[in-house]
Image: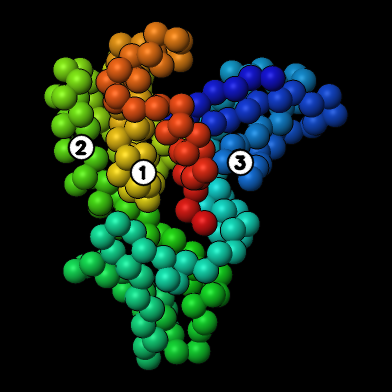
């Protein structure tokens, strides 16, 4: 078995199966892609297959999530926006984001809970979250970096499947747009966590002690609280 992390697809687990005749990819409820390989296929070949089919796989993940999580998103609110369903004389679904509203226009004979409407709402919400994240997260990250006297290289803000954030060996920080759904103190915890990784590349005692010192808070309690949330938009 081999596990890797991809910035676009999240955590991926490769497993060789004795009776597998082809490469298969599936998504599990915990936000991971599981790839089954025939015994004759190397892990490197499996990774290359995944990279060459990344666009199709990402689209399938979105569809599977929409089917698996049937929560009604019609009344969902982001930090600065709320969903507003509008029934109109139209044949297609459309949305517009402005002035604190995510206006989703649907045909009059369509229900908000229909799969296609929910999928559109999900897309609109993630676009709103991305807009909010690009405004809030860089500013807050720089404030914390200045407070802690730490530096990082580049900041990337994107949607990933299973991580709130990460820090590369080159001190590039990746932040998930879904951080915008968290309370302020948990956003600060994730940002502080990744900034601390610019000095400590693992989760050693030195890392946790340093993070505790930086935040002057119970980081174990914050970590446990964060575990009550999911990066997936239900």
- Percent across and percent down for residue 134 are 23, 45
Q: Is residue 178 visible?
A: yes
Q: Secondary structure at mark 1?
A: helix
Q: Relative to the observer, which residue lies in front, 182 or 136?
A: 182
- Percent across and percent down for residue 55 are 47, 43
The correct choice, above or below, for 166 with respect to 54 in the image is above
Residue under label 3: 30
Give the class, few, some or many, for how many residues have Cα within 10 Å of label 3's Cα (few <14, many ≥20). few
- Name the disc covering residue 140, or none: 2
For marks 2 and 3 on the same chain, the one whose residue lies earlier in the sequence: 3
Q: Secondary structure at mark 2?
A: helix
Q: Is residue 112 left or right of residue 68?
A: left
Residue drawn at (77%, 20%) of the image:
39
Q: Is residue 199 left or right of residue 54?
A: left
Give the class, few, some or many, for how many residues have Cα within 10 Å of label 2's Cα (few <14, many ≥20). some
Residue drawn at (85%, 29%) of the image:
19
Gap in Å between the C-alphas at discs 2 and 3? Answer: 29 Å
Q: Relative to the observer, which residue lies in front, 81 or 43?
A: 81
Nearer to us of marks 2 and 3 is 2
Residue under label 1: 179
Q: Secondary structure at mark 3?
A: loop
For marks 2 and 1 on the same chain, the one whose residue lies earlier in the sequence: 2
Gap in Å between the C-alphas at discs 2 and 1? Answer: 12 Å
Q: Relative to the observer, which residue lies in front, 210 or 56?
A: 210
| Quarter of the image where the N terminus is located | top right
The correct choice, above or below, for 199 with respect to 220 in the image is above
Res 190 quadrant in image: top left
Res 49 quadrant in image: top right
Gap in Å between the C-alphas at discs 1 and 3? Answer: 17 Å
């Amino acid at each position: 078995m081999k596990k890797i992390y991809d910035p676009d697809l999240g955590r991926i687990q490769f497993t060789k199966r004795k009776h597998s005749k082809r490469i298969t990819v599936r998504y599990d409820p915990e936000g991971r892609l599981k790839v089954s390989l025939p015994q004759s296929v190397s892990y490197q070949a499996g990774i290359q297959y995944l990279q060459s089919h990344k666009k199709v796989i990402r689209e399938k993940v979105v569809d599977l999530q929409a089917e698996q999580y049937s929560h009604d998103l019609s009344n969902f609110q982001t930090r600065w926006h709320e969903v507003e369903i509008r029934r109109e004389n139209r044949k297609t679904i459309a949305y517009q984001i402005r002035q604190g509203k995510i206006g989703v226009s649907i045909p009059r004979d369509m229900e908000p809970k229909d799969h296609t409407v929910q999928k559109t709402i999900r897309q609109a919400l993630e676009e709103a979250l991305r807009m909010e994240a690009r405004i809030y997260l860089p500013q807050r990250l720089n404030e914390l970096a200045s407070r802690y006297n730490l530096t990082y290289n580049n900041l990337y803000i994107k949607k990933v499947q299973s991580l709130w954030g990460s820090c590369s060996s080159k001190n590039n920080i990746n932040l998930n747009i879904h951080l915008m759904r968290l309370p302020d103190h948990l956003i600060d915890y994730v940002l502080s966590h990744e900034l601390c990784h610019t000095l400590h590349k693992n989760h050693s005692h030195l890392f946790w002690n340093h993070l505790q010192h930086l935040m002057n808070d119970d980081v174990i309690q914050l970590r446990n609280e964060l575990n009550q949330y999911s990066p997936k938009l239900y």
